[in-house]
Every structure is written in C-alpha cells, then in structure tokens.
Amino acid sequence: MRGRRVETPPGLIRPAMDRMRESVFAVLGDMNGRSFLDLFTGSGIIALEAASRGALQVEAVEMDKKKYKILLKNVSMAPVRINCRFMAVELYIRQARQTFDYIFCDPPFPYRYKRELAASIAASALLAGSGILMMHRPREDFWADGVNGFTLSDRRAYGRSIVDFWRLEAKNVSI
C-alpha cells in the first residue's frame, strides 16, 4: 500500500511518523497470518500498516466518534477487513474475547494511566502467550521499574517518542 494517502481526522492526533512505523514493523518481522490490535488508533495508519504487511486479523479501537468517518474511509483501502470498534480502550480490554499476536497501544501523550493499561492487558487474555505489546509513549514517561506482567524485550527512540516492546512474563506453573 506504499504511497497511498491516509487522511487525518479532526481533533487531537499524532499520526505515527513514517520512520517510526517502518522501524516498528522491521522489529516485528513477518506479519503473514498474524493478528494485530491497534488501540487508540486515531487515523488507523498502524492498523493499515499491519494489514498491508500480511496480518489477517486486524482490529482498531478508537473512542473519539469525531474520527469515525475518516477512520472508516482510511481502513477501507486495506487488503483485508479491519474491524473498527468505537469505544473506550479500557472497556474494550475488559470485554474483548479475542487473542492477538501483536498489540500496538498509542494513548495520547498526556494520558496518565499507561502502566495501568499495560497491566490490564497482561491480566486479560488479549495477548497471545508469545505475543508482543508495543507501547508508544513520550520520552518523559520514564518507566524504570517496568510494567507488572511484562518483560521489556526492546526499546526504540524516535525523537521525543519511545516505543517499548513488552513480552508477557512466564507464569509460574507448579507441578
């Protein structure tokens, strides 16, 4: 889908930089047949990138109803259907019954509950056991002590932005 234009919806939005998107998907590698969840999707550009790289099950979640029309228009160009859910991400996490190989979480930079959001994903069945949660955050949000339920596997910096790559911690199993 290289070269296609994606519209930006009205309101507060930070479309993912081309360089950041390219780098994130290079870290992830082959997306063929994988599932991908884009939380706080905005324009849907990350979900589109996943679909264009071979992800078969793609879902995008956005709460801002003002972005509805443009988001649906943008995802209509995808090679596979991108399911769009218009609801609060926190509610989606509590209600979702699907499991995803990759979850990209891009809350607004002023959003205060990024750690709690990650912990609720770890406690849910949303992320496959070998899956990866990516959290896009400002450099100022320093997480020295990590996130409950996750182990940091990679971190990439893009100017003021950081994308952390988290894997679920292995559950202790007693025999």
Image: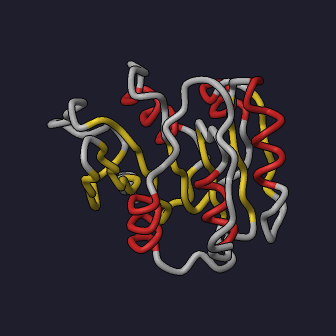
Identify the residue at image location x=47%, y=78%: 29
Horizontal side, residue 106 vs residue 173: left or right: right
Quadrant in which residue 11 is drawn: top right
Query: Which x, y percent locates residue 40?
Result: 59, 36
**Residue located farthest toward the left when viewing the structure as drawn:** 144
Residue 16: x %, y % from top left? 48, 49
Q: Position of residue 10 (x, y in %)?
A: 66, 28
Is residue 112 shown left or right of residue 122?
left
Query: Is 144 on the left-hand or right-hand side of 60?
Result: left
The residue located at (19%, 34%) in the rendering is: 142
For the rendered model, the colour scheme is secondary structure
Of 12 and 118, nearer the camera is 12
Q: Quadrant of residue 140?
A: top left
Q: Is residue 40 above or below residue 168?
A: above
> The C terminus is located in which quarter?
bottom left
Q: Residue at x 73, y 31 (%)?
A: 67
Could you tell me which residue is drawn at 39 percent across and 62 percent down?
19
Quarter of the picture holding the N terminus: bottom right
> Does residue 114 lie above or below 163 as drawn?
above
Nearer the observer, 168 or 104: 104
Asked if residue 149 lies left or right of residue 71, the reply is left
Residue 90 spot, x, y in % from top left: 60, 26
Q: Is residue 167 above or below residue 136?
A: below
